[in-house]
Image (tube, helix red, strand yellow):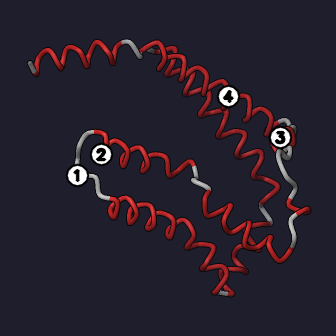
Amino acid sequence: MLGLLGAAATTLGASFEPLRLGGWLLLGSIYLSIGTLYLTGHAAYLFRSVGAKLSRVDASKGTFSLGVLFGMNVPACAAPLLAVLLGQAALGAEPSVARGFVTLAVFGAALSAPLLLALWWPAARRLLDRVSRWADRVPVVLGLVLIAVGAWSIYQGLAL
């Protein structure tokens, strides 16, 4: 019975191979496009405002609203942790609401720690001011990194 289950899982997994190839190529093309926009100085197209403008939010409610908005935001770098938690629950590993809470709470605290450090420690604020002087170089470096990742992703897709 387990052998049949293994064969079924392999068959099902193999059916996703074309999707994986397409994913490598699609994401690689997106990375290349965004990297090229950054390198050519046309990244402003990526920053168009969608939705309500923050200038329309009442100042007394604005701070609370922004806190709630940013608190509910899940950064992309948290996706692997969410996938692990979902996978554990789906595979029948002892799903623990407390474990899920602690895992992402520690992640969120670590993500916010540099901001708290800059808020409470004047030397950290001065360091951020010095680092911010390099901000004009960020689009070029980001563009080069995205183009490299895009080229690698497309290569991976074609090598399959």
SS at circle 4:
helix
Mark 3 sits on what residue?
43
Q: 50 left or right of 144?
A: right
Secondary structure beneath label 2: helix
Quarter of the image with the C terminus in it: top left
Q: Amino acid at mark 3?
A: Ala
Q: Position of residue 148 (x, y in %)?
A: 62, 33
Residue 24 - label: none
Name which of mark 4 and mark 2 comes first in the sequence. Answer: 4
Q: Which residue is mark 1?
A: 94
Inter-mark Cα distance, 4 to 1: 38 Å
Q: Earlier in the sequence, mark 2 or mark 1?
A: 2
- In percent of the image, x 78 and y 53: which residue is there? 137
For mark 4, does the 10 Å Cα neighbourhood hold few (<14), some (14 to 19), or many (20 or more) residues? some
According to the image, label 2 marks what residue? 88
Q: Is 124 on the left-hand or right-hand side of 90?
A: right
Element carrying mark 3: helix
Dots 3, 2 in contact, CB < 8 A:
no
Label 1 SS: loop
